Image: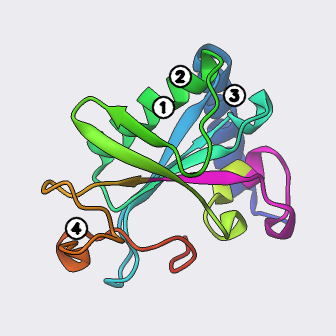
């Protein structure tokens, strides 16, 4: 893909910043705010864990601060040598998370795939960190209020 010189310069600066963050912390968090349509939730994901032999991590439907807190905590454990696997229940502070496979990472991890120079069809793998509502319900539990909590199921949304 060919870009105009201004876009190329901006992408080069972004790449240099990302490289510095990944060198320092071993991963970075990419946050994507909510889209213009109501079915486009905010989400965030890690970039760098694939280079450590682990799937990237994704959180959907949370604000920037909560997304960074959750991803920083779990990715920090991965950097320290822990692997997280689908089906696992994690606790981060007062939050409970279930690890699920992200079935369409090429549609979600645009920045990570750009970083690793992989086309969407050969995307880096990812795990979705599904969070419980304040009442302790997960999206598959009775009592889950998906409209109020805005956490779509894996494979039902894209970036």
Q: Quadrant of the N terminus?
A: bottom right
* Tag of residue 77: 2
Tell me the crowding category of disc 2: few under 14, some 14 to 19, or many 20 or more residues within 10 angstroms, Cα based.
few
* Any part of residue 48 in sight: yes
Distance from disc 4 to disc 1, alpha carbons, whole Å, reads 21 Å
Instruction: State the residue position of label 3.
Output: 19
Q: Is residue 104 above or below residue 54?
A: below
* Tag of residue 74: 1
User: SS of the residue at dot 4?
Assistant: helix
Q: Residue at x 40, y 73 (%)?
A: 152
**Comes first in the chain, label 1 or label 3:** 3
Tell me the crowding category of disc 1: few under 14, some 14 to 19, or many 20 or more residues within 10 angstroms, Cα based.
many
- Does residue 141 appear to the left or right of 10 in the view shown? left
* Tag of residue 91: none
User: SS of the residue at dot 1?
Assistant: helix
Please name whichever residue, 56 or 91, is drawn nearer the observer in this view of the structure: 91
Task: Answer whether residue 38 is magenta in the image.
Answer: no
* Any part of residue 6 in sight: no
Distance from disc 1 to disc 3, alpha carbons, whole Å, reads 20 Å
Distance from disc 2 to disc 4, alpha carbons, whole Å, reads 26 Å
Q: Which residues are magenta?
A: 113-129
């Amino acid at each position: 893909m060919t870009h105009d010189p201004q876009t190329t310069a901006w992408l080069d600066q972004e790449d240099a910043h990302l490289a510095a963050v990944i060198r320092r912390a071993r991963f970075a968090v990419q946050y994507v705010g909510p889209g213009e349509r109501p079915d486009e939730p905010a989400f965030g994901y890690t970039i760098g864990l694939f280079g450590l032999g682990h799937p990237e991590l994704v959180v959907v439907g949370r604000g920037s601060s909560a997304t960074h807190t959750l991803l920083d905590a779990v990715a920090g454990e991965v950097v320290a040598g822990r692997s997280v696997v689908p089906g696992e229940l994690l606790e981060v502070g007062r939050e409970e998370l279930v690890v699920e496979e992200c079935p369409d990472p090429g549609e979600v991890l645009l920045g990570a795939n750009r970083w690793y120079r992989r086309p969407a069809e050969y995307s880096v793998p990812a795990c979705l960190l599904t969070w419980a509502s304040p009442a302790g319900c997960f999206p598959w539990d009775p009592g889950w209020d998906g409209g109020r909590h805005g956490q779509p199921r894996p494979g039902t949304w894209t970036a």
